Amino acid sequence: MGPTLRAARALVLLAGFYLLGLVLLAALAAADWAAAVHTPGAFALKVFLVSAVLALPIVRGMFMLRTPPQEDVPGVRVDESREPRLWQTVRDVAQQVGTRAPDEIVLTGDVNAAVSEDSRLLGLAGGTRRLRIGLPLMTGLSESGLRAVLAHEMGHYGNADTRLAAVSERGRVHVLRTIAHFEERADAKVSKERARQEKKAASAVAKGRKAKEVDTTGTGVTYRAMARLYTAYGKFYLRATLSGSRRAEFAADVAAARIAGRDATSSALREIPVIDAAHDFYLNCYATLGVDAGLLPPPGEFLGGFRHLLAARHEELDALRGELPTEPVSPYDSHPPIAERVARIEALPDDGRASDPVRPSLSLLADADRSFAAVEETVLTPAALGLRRLDWPELVHAAMSVQTERSAQRFGALALGTAGGEDTSPHGTDGGGGGTPGHGADAHGTPGHGADARPGADADRTSRPEADPEGDGAGAATLGALLDAIDAGALWRIAERLPRSAEAAAAHGRAAREFARPQIRAGLSQLVSAEYLRQGRARWQLSWAESAALELPYGHVDELPAALEAAVADHPDTGPLRALLEPVAAPETSVPTQAPAPGPTA
């Protein structure tokens, strides 16, 4: 379907919204006329009032012509003097597509590329064109992959998709706005009726009579019936316009394959879901790891650190590239499933242009580090920008130490009966890799799932582990009190304070002890890890390729498991554990090794 036919269809669909409004207004007018002619005056007046309140949302929806402005995506606008290679590449691609290049290029902080156009006269006249490119997307794509993405976006310009989007968007906004008006009025009427009945019921109770149950069934039904009419048209409108959007995506993919090559386009489409998943993991597990401790990575590294993750985990990412995501298909999707798009591109004849993944697309930027830092300023909130900045190794150690301390103190309070009812029980055995600190400071933990991922978290929080409200003295006292309780024969009474599954709660004797032993061992391991950190004899080590690891004093990684087992044995012995934790006069030589995991707590 060409641009002319698509424009005509968009205008017809928009006109359908106004036609529906006119039909409903005519129906209300007909009801008013019939009431005036054939019914008594009092009833006719009631019909007039109902018609008036129903007509108001219809008229408002029809004549509120201005559509709300699109939400501005945070980013940095770059001109040709700042990014000459990027601009030249975009212009070259636009010329090959046969369309006008964008007037603005904006670098953003998300895994996306998008085009827009400030069209006028319902899309009949073009306007300022704007291209948004996400730096994380550029981080993961090769130069040829980025050219394929740019060709796809320029294809939207060439097919007039951005201009015609103004008409479709206006129709969607008007339909949704009218539905919202009716729903708001229905909700307001229900609230008013509920308040009236509750007041009446309270009066009846005060007089010693039985109050009637509040029942708002049927209240606002007329408004909701009108909303259902518009909802039905809205569904038809969305299905019609979004099916056109999906066809536009296929057409833009074909334009990309024609300009950048079949293989490069297919490779880029396969790469985007991988980059998106990896970036989510990076944000959750690295970039926001220290937010809960008042920390962020160095300027530019909040976004730029994604490069380190992609370089270190290429084998894992290679496995993801071979498996396209399976997505549920809906008639209200604006984009086709990525697997279908890839299949269509790969079904095209071989054009002899192999994908060249050698040069990263970030090489098109004059100064990638400067760009990361500039975009970061727009992405983060003012509160987040005020957080303390640390290099990655220091950040991981400080943030993980805070999480380890807090997790250990929660378990200690629970085990000693001072938790105040908070559910902080260990939910796993130690020694398992891949835990998530902050849900418990697992010594093999992946940084950051437990960190507050909100960039606007409290900027006054400190990075020092000892700044935790349950700090040094309290932590050592908690561990000592727990070991003393174990020595006093209270090990299994401690186990009774921990939340248990139904199966564990029903067990008795040795079976009950076997259920409780891993739980206690995991929590005790948390406390031990926190004590090592307080003494300065352990350090969390950053790893981009795997989970963070706790580096223990030389030899302790071999001795600690046996000491923990002895402390939770049928006949407990805390001596080996106390000996390991005895402070030494001189610093011990440490070797990078992974400690037994303290076992995460919920």
Image (spheres, grey):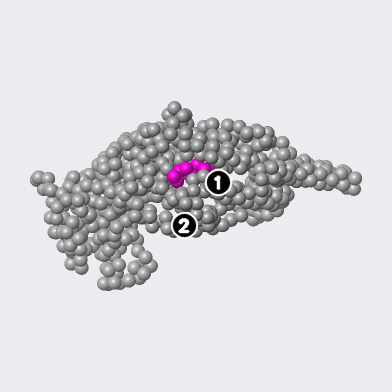
Toward the left, the furthest residue is 585
**Three-letter code, disc 2:** Leu
Q: Which comes sooner in the sequence, label 2 or label 1?
A: 1
Residue beneath disc 1: 255
For the point 57% across and 50% down, the residue is 250
Toward the front, the furthest residue is 352
Is residue 376 visible in the rendered image? The answer is no
Counting from the top left corner in percent of width and height, residue 461 is at 33, 38
Q: Is residue 145 magenta?
A: yes
Above or below: residue 231 compared with residue 57:
below
- Which residue is at the front of the view, 598 or 92? 92
Query: Which of the 4 quarters of the picture holds residue 158?
Result: top right
Which element type, helix, strand or loop, lies under badge 2?
Answer: loop
Query: Which of the 4 quarters of the picture holds residue 81?
Result: top left
The residue mark sitting in front, 2 or 1, is 1
Q: Residues within 10 Å of mark 2 (few under 14, many from 20)?
A: some
Residue beneath disc 2: 324
Question: Along the horizontal axis of the image, is 169 left or right of 269?
Answer: right
Region of the chain picked out in magenta, as a range: 144-153
Counting from the top left corner in percent of width and height, residue 429 is at 29, 61
For the point 63% across and 33% down, the residue is 126
Assign the C terminus to one quadrant of the image.
bottom left
**Three-letter code, disc 1:** Ala
- Which residue is at the front of the view, 267 or 221? 267
Counting from the top left corner in percent of width and height, residue 76 is at 45, 32
- Which residue is at the front of the view, 219 or 431? 431
Q: Residues within 10 Å of mark 1 (few under 14, many from 20)?
A: many
Question: Magenta-highlighted stretch: main secondary structure?
Answer: helix
Question: Along the horizontal axis of the image, is 355 left or right of 567?
Answer: right
